[in-house]
Image (cartoon, rainbow, N blue to C red):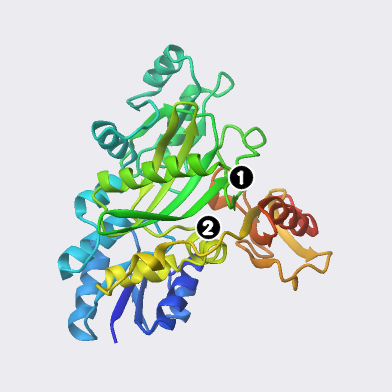
Amino acid sequence: MKTLLIISGGLEAVPGIQHAKGMGFKTVVSDGNLDAPGFKYSDYQIVASTYDIEETLKLALQFNEQVRPIDGVISVAADVPMTVAKVAEALKLPGISMQTAQLSSDKFLMKKHFAEQGISVPWFAIVESASHLKKVMSEKDFSLIIKPVDSRGARGVLKLSDAVDFNWAYDYSRSYSPSRKVMVEEFLSGPQISTESVMLNGKGFTSGFSDRNYEYLERFSPFVVENGGQMPSALSATERQQVSTLAEKAALAMGITNGTAKGDLVLTPEGPKVIEMAARLSGGWFCTNQIPYATGVDLMGAAFKIVLNEPVTEAELIPKFQKAVAVRYFFPEPGILKSVRCQADYLDCEWLLRSGFFVFPGEEIEPVSDHTKRFGFVIATGQDASQAIDRAQKLIDSYKIETEACN
């Protein structure tokens, strides 16, 4: 029985842990939170922060020598490629290289590499200071995004405008960068797409293809917060193929020939462009719930088998059907959460795929500034994407969420 190390024990990793066990693998979960939800479902536990590369490596090597051999390492819904790559390298396991992990961890290096490899990306540049940011803003005749080069979950990401103070924007974005580096890039107009591909022997299979929903850009301005997405995409077959082809090229440019690649792309009038590419399994219940339901592709299972050196066939990666699914998020008033009540009988509906909350009574609902501040979610299905969206929104609207102001 092979043993899979999953470096992430958060709530979104739980379906992955359960799935790996269901496939007959032993699971060891590594997480710095003693109360990590994934620990309840794993066979073994390693207590180390997913971002602490050296501690995770030390404890993984100890486990490998003293408990049982580790046959594969991966993360589920956690953006920790350097940690995964370091363990894989030390144990001589299949996985991404340290170079690939570095590109996946630094958005500026990633875009620079893509540009050098002929991969279409928006205009971008490092910003050295607030005054430098002011200069760039005055020189460009298009909208700009500022972001940390090495953060995640939309932390520190801002859409710039004349109404945004450049000093504050620079300091705010920089505060979310472990390396204290920020960059700007052109804000691209056009449909935004989330892709998730399995690369198999250098060939990409993109079963994950979701239209991202940014309907609240004005509401939460200058913060850039996504309100879910939906499948199947509204793009034409030709447009989907263009996006999928670029996602495959970007993954190969990063050195991903076998494994998963999570992409954020925009279809512009000049064609698709890559915003980011991650060498990992996605969060947001994308790989765990949405893709399997919408396409019949066991993307997680394929990813597990690849890192465990188990055979994967191309047939496993080809969508069997196209069903509709949509995810939407709750955005209640900030404050101390008093109560949450559903005022309609939707919770037992067959079209409700999954729902949940991240804040509980007595805890604070913080103002929305990034994806970590979202209160909860709903994933609904339908005859088409429009119906799935309507159902998700109806369930959200049926909740009464009471808060009180913080002292």
Left or right? Give the position of 101 relative to 77. left
Image position of 10 with respect to 79: above or below: below
* Res 355 quadrant in image: bottom right
Expressed as whole percent of the image width and height from the top left, the position of residue 63 reads: 24, 80
**Residue type, label 1:** Val
> Tag 1, which secondary structure?
loop
Left of 311 or right of it: where is 281?
right
The spot of residue 200 in percent (x, y) is: 29, 60
The residue carrying mark 2 is 284
Relative depth, front residue between 306 and 40: 306
Residue 59 percent coordinates (x, y) = 24, 73
Count numbered badges in the picture: 2
Three-letter amino acid code at the position of disc 2: Gly
Question: Residue at coordinates 45% horizontally, 69% vertically from top-left?
Answer: 298
At 26% from the left and 54% from the top, the residue drawn is 202
* Mark 2 → mark 1, Cα distance in angstroms: 17 Å
- Badge 2 element: loop
Can residue 51 be spotted in the picture? yes
> The N terminus is located in which quarter?
bottom left
| Residue 94 placement: quadrant | bottom left
Query: Which residue in the protein does label 1 denote?
Result: 368
Q: Residues within 10 Å of mark 2 (few under 14, many from 20)?
A: some
Query: Which numbered mark, 2 or 1, is in the foreground of this view?
Result: 2
Quick one: label 2 or label 1, which is nearer the N terminus? 2
Q: Are marks 2 and 1 in contact (CB under 8 Å)?
A: no
**Can I make out residue 153 in this image?**
no
Could you tell me which residue is drawn at 48 percent across and 58 percent down?
Answer: 283
**Could you say which is closer to the camera, residue 185 or residue 19?**
19
